Image (cartoon, grey):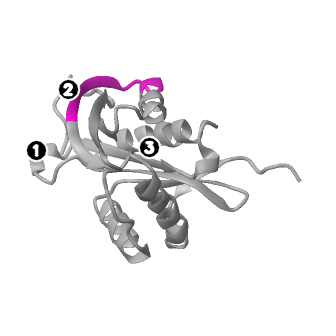
Amino acid sequence: MPDQPLLLRPSVDADLPALTRIYGHAVLHGTGTFELEAPDDAEMARRRDAVLANGLPWLVAERDGAVLGYAYANHFRPRRAYRFCVEDSIYLDDGARGHGVGRLLLTELLAQCAARGARQMLAVIGDSANAGSIGVHRACGFEDSGVLKAAGWKFGRWLDVVLMQKALGEGAATEPRD
């Protein structure tokens, strides 16, 4: 039986073990996150609930019943002036990398955040050598905003943080509606 098409959908509670596994692998083996200890299912549920409580999307990519990756956006900072600025996060299962899953997730995330009134999306990318994440953001129209040199220490080395940004909808051209 051939593979089912890729399905992008809102995450549900039943996805938590897959979300925890995917993120845990990124924490323990990657530099895209500067977290050093992998969170458990309960902590991932708390994080997901916080995003959803803010009225923002947490999406999963699924094929043949398996979660291949996820993406979500949350407010960049908690202060009210930042309410139109979101930061994206995308994590993929190792087997899903390089197959366009991240780009599809990011494209849908951009659309959903714009529909919810967000005006700017930021990418705060761990590790300036993270070519996959930098590339997918560029392909989706993000522009370089800066680099925080040696901002994190993981796996025995200093890591940069790459900042990228994309205007959503009318961006800063008009006043937002509250």
Please indicate, yes or no, whether residue 68 appears anywhere in the rendered image: yes
Q: Does dot 1 land on a helix, a strand or a loop?
A: helix
In magenta, the rendered stretch is: 138-149
Nearer to the camera, 35 or 167: 35
Rate crowding at label 3 as few (under 14), some (14 to 19) or many (20 or more) other CA atoms within 10 Å.
Answer: many
Q: Nearer the viewer, mark 3 or mark 2?
A: 3
Give me the residue at 52% from left, 65% from top: 21
Rate crowding at label 1 as few (under 14), some (14 to 19) or many (20 or more) other CA atoms within 10 Å.
Answer: few
Question: Which label's residue is closer to the chain start, 1 or 2?
Answer: 1
Q: Is residue 112 left or right of residue 1?
A: left
Question: Which label's residue is closer to the chain start, 3 or 2?
Answer: 3
Give me the residue at 10% from left, 51% from top: 79
Q: Establish if 46 lies above or below 131.
A: below
Q: Does dot 3 land on a helix, a strand or a loop?
A: helix
Q: Does dot 2 land on a helix, a strand or a loop?
A: loop
Amino acid marked by disc 2? Ala
Q: Quadrant of residue 142?
A: top left
Amino acid marked by disc 1? Ala
Give me the residue at 15% from left, 54% from top: 78
Mark carried by residue 26: none
- In percent of width and height, residue 175 lies at 16, 31
User: Dot 2 corresponds to which residue?
Assistant: 172
Question: Mark 1 to mark 2: distance in Å?
Answer: 13 Å
Residue 143 belongs to magenta span: yes
- In percent of width and height, residue 172 lies at 20, 26
Rate crowding at label 2 as few (under 14), some (14 to 19) or many (20 or more) other CA atoms within 10 Å.
Answer: few
User: Dot 3 corresponds to which residue?
Assistant: 109
Question: Mark 1 to mark 3: distance in Å?
Answer: 22 Å
Mark carried by residue 81: 1
